[in-house]
Image (tube, grey):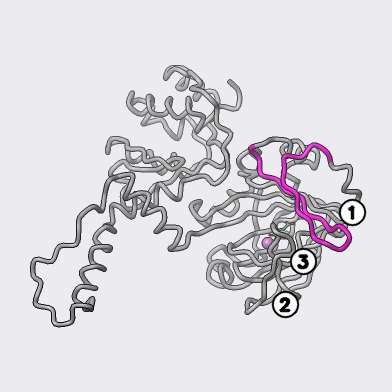
Amino acid sequence: MILTINDITPEQFLKDYWQKKPLVIRQGFKNFKDLLSPEEMAGLATEEQIESRRVFKENGEWQAEFGPFESYDHLGEKDWTFIVQALNNWVPEADELIKCFDFIPRWRLDDVMVSYGTPGGGVGPHIDLYDVFICQGSGSRRWRVGDIGDHKEFAAHPALLHVEEFEPIIDIELKTGDILYIPPGFPHDGVSLTNSMSFSVGYRTASARDMHSVLADYLIDNELGSQQIADPDRSVSTTSGQINNQDLALIKQQLLDTLDDQLISDLAGRYLTNSKCDLDLPSENLGFQAEDVVAMLKEQPLIKLGGLRCMYLEKTVSQGIFYINGEQEVLSTDLADVIPVLCDQQSLTAQQLESWLQQPQFVQQLTTWVNAGYWYFEQD
Ligand code: SIN
Ligand code: CO
């Protein structure tokens, strides 16, 4: 799959549109093929651990239902939409789509969501917190996007936060292969014109509140930050009810002291590699021996499990540190160069790993990951 952003480069896109304004990308994908069929979607939605929902109107009232779903009979042939979240965790083809957007790093990625709409179907006008590239598959949808501004939101249903009517700055029909990029805060509303499929590559970030809450857990789990405020240089107080500026500075400093670079990078690595949705992991160790892994790797690539978040920090990678699925992994420093190969690539070949496959410590580690299901062979 090759992405073409009208006649601009990814650099220009980031400079002029990313997080700034919406963009209609006509024929961003030539010959775009749906990543799965509606029947396959329905199959996924029968599974308990796969997040799915349906949105429709009943007697003029918005309704939302959450999976797993067995039957679609009561929905009829129009005015409903069916969504499966984290498609990339279950359908390897979804990763081919994500790769097209890898000029944005994976830590910013949330997931690929697929939406199947019947004519008239949509989830209603709303605002998202995050950036999204809505890639139109089969069929067509009308999208209206309003300007960023002071839009009033309301619950059209306990599970549907909608936004009041807005003046569109974009009002278009998206056809197969077209893409609509929407940054956070822009109200939008998509309505299927025919039976249609769309694939949304969604991004996420973190709020300071999220990070502070993770920090609090981190300090508790690692028994850090237990030093008490110390004030051996105290001077006489004449205002015993006051917390003076000097004391406030001490309190602030105590909080700031917990935030050293090493802690922030470890916290970020763990937090940003945490998967929000279930992964397709085996329930037990797969039992591969190191020799099997090396032999099979000569025949076929190892594929990174869809949705597995595997990242390193520029700051700590030379120490052999990286993160998989919310956990820190530490390799010996002479293996540090393999980390970008593991994290930047979505599959591993014997050729890419050649110089490290000679090293028993690496092969052992790789085998552990294969046995945990983090990388897999398509045929075993
Ligand atoms: C949809 O694809 O049906 C809704 C996507 C969105 O607007 O966020
Ligand atoms: Co949206």
Label 3 is placed on what type of residue? Answer: Trp
Q: Is residue 357 above or below residue 276?
A: above
Label 2 is placed on what type of residue? Answer: Ile
64 and 179: which is toward the camera: 64
Q: Tell me how far mark 3 sits from mark 1, CA to CA.
A: 17 Å
Query: Does dot 1 land on a helix, a strand or a loop?
Result: loop
Image: magenta residue range: 49-71
Query: Does dot 3 land on a helix, a strand or a loop?
Result: strand
**Location of residue 329 in the rendering, given as x and y in whole percent from the top left corner:** 36, 38
Q: Residue at left 33%, top 55%?
A: 264
As drawn, the residue found furthest toward the bottom would be 238
Label 1 is placed on what type of residue? Answer: Lys
In the image, which disc is placed on residue 169?
2
**Location of residue 231 in the rendering, given as x and y in whole percent from the top left corner:** 13, 66
Tag 1 residue: 78
Q: Is mark 3 within 8 Å of ligand 1?
A: no
